[in-house]
Image (cartoon, rainbow, N blue to C red):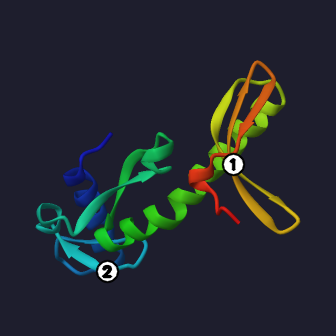
Amino acid sequence: MPGKEMIFTKGAEALRQITGVDKDLYACPLCRSAFPEKALDTGSLTLEHVPPDSIDGRGIVLTCHQCNSKAGHTIEAQLHRRRELIKFAQALAGEGNYSGRIQLTMSETETNVETEIEDGQLKMVVPDEINDPK
């Protein structure tokens, strides 16, 4: 995995070639704001994992702190939910086991359910502490 400094250097060189501006600046690929190399030390530029670190991604690009945080909150959460859904579906099909929380909706009532699928056996528990008592 390349270090942050190497990614900055390659990105700054690419930006110089595109813009013709002779400065060491790195542009966040999401918002296109430009940053000097000291932004690595201040935390203004952060290592972005692709796919997200939560699903075993690798740090391959720098993004500004604000974009990295926004991506973590929205994109990474959706990717994590998708990964969990795939694991759940595979376990239902008899391909492995699953343990986690799902949300069931019946007649407009949502219920959080702790679910375990082991060796093709489905076990569900409805804990009071994670559900609306109504």
- x then y, percent, for residue 14: 33, 66
How far, Cα to Cα, is label 1 from label 2? 39 Å
Q: Secondary structure at mark 2?
A: loop
Residue receiving disc 1: 102
Marks 1 & 2, CB-CB < 8 Å contact: no
* Up-down relation of residue 8 to residue 19 (above or below): above
Looking at the image, is mark 1 or mark 2 earlier in the sequence?
2
Figure label count: 2
- Quarter of the image with the C terminus in it: bottom right
Would you call the spot at circle 2 few (<14 residues within 10 Å), some (14-19), or many (20 or more)? few
Q: Secondary structure at mark 1?
A: strand
Q: Is residue 123 left or right of residue 66?
A: right
Q: Residue at x 40, y 79 (%)?
A: 31
Q: Nearer the viewer, residue 83 or 65?
A: 83
Query: What's under tag 1, amino acid-wise?
Result: Ile
**Residue 66 position in % (x across, y down):** 33, 73
Q: Is residue 31 shown left or right of residue 40?
A: right
Q: Nearer the viewer, mark 1 or mark 2?
A: 1
Q: Is residue 132 left or right of residue 30?
A: right
> Which image quadrant is residue 20 in?
bottom left
List x then y, in percent, for residue 42. 13, 66
Pinpoint residue 70: horizontal percent, then vertical percent: 42, 70
In the image, 72 versus 31, the foreground residue is 72
Q: Which quarter of the rendered picture does the N terminus lie within?
A: top left
Circle 2 sits on which residue? 33
